[in-house]
Amino acid sequence: MGDDMDDQRRLAADWFRELRDRITQAFEALEDRGPTDRPAARFAVTPTERADNGGGGLMSVMRNGRVFEKVGVNWSEVHGTLSSKARAAMAARGVPGLEKDPRFWASGISLVAHMQNPHAPAVHMNTRMFWTPEAWWFGGGADLNPCIEYPEDTGHFHDTLRAACTPHGADYYERFKSWADEYFFIPHRGRARGVGGIFYDDLNSGDWQADFAFTKSVGEAFLPAFLPLAKARMTQDWTDADRETQLIHRGLYAEYNLVYDRGTKFGLETGHDPDAVLMSLPPLVKWP
């Protein structure tokens, strides 16, 4: 495959950055419409750098707002040489040529939102492209993590993702929903961390444009899937018992991301800014 994907990599990185900009603007606009018992929050934006001049990105975190207790929207574009551990993990997934040439490039957007109101669901979304001299692929998805589930919210979230998937492959939604159900399962708890969504990785159909178009559809679906739920729940009355339920449920999220999440492991192993890698962790958590 060689180094002939410069244009495609640039297109992907620029699109992930533009999506990041649109989402942060939409979240700040939602903050302005939230309960007025506190000031509307704004994103603090911090440039990040990977070790050994291997690129970096933007870490955007908003805390203690009207709607969002903590939300991070990170964009990155990194490159370098894969560690032996990362090479072995990717080779086991079928990525070719890593022993001969372990260089890599990756770009993407990663988002996690933890909400003030216990009735508003936490949410995760990411889309990314990965390149090595012998391969390229896309990955990503979105999943909803309510501590108090509303079936109509779950239905809306999944319906929106289904509509994004179907034009690109008749079986995409069912395949990637099943993958999410498996991927976001917490073995030591014997349960999922939320109500699912879609997840996919190693997507290379041989048609870069088609796979990029699908990945863009997943990213474009996020705001329509999530914003109506946040708007509907952000002013709902809640009790101390609801807050306790929320804090304990967040423990599932923390446990999953620290023990199982592939992106967390990769980010820490490849020298990316640890604060950016661990941005997904909730601000306050309780364990029973």
Image (tube, grey):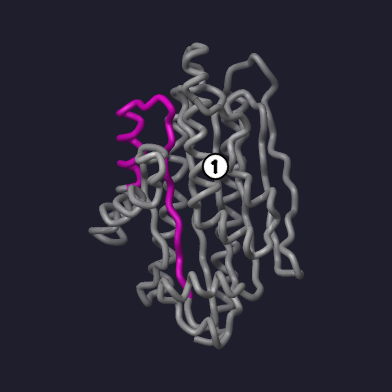
Quadrant housing residue 149: top left
Q: Which residues are magenta?
A: 136-161
Q: Position of residue 240 (x, y in %)?
A: 52, 12
Residue type pointed to by label 1: Val
Quadrant housing residue 189: top left
Tell me, yes or no, whether the highlighted magenta stretch contains residue 60: no
Tell me, yes or no, whether the highlighted magenta stretch contains residue 137: yes
Residue at left offset 35%, top offset 41%: 190
Location of mark 1 (residue) = 112
User: What residue occupies the far left of the structure in this picture?
Assistant: 170
Along the horizontal axis of the image, is 17 left or right of 91?
right
Residue at left offset 51%, top offset 19%: 244
Q: Position of residue 200 (x, y in %)?
A: 39, 58
Q: Position of residue 227 (x, y in %)?
A: 47, 34
**Residue 270 vertical position relative to residue 183 in the rendered view, above or below:** below
Viewer-proximal residue among 25 and 70: 70
**Residue 189 vertical position relative to residue 264 in the rendered view, above or below:** above
Residue at left offset 55%, top offset 37%: 113
Mark 1, Cα crowd under 10 Å, few <14 / some 14-19 / many 20+, is: many
**Residue 93 vertical position relative to residue 147 in the rendered view, above or below:** below
Q: Position of residue 112 (x, y in %)?
A: 54, 42
Viewer-proximal residue among 28 and 58: 58
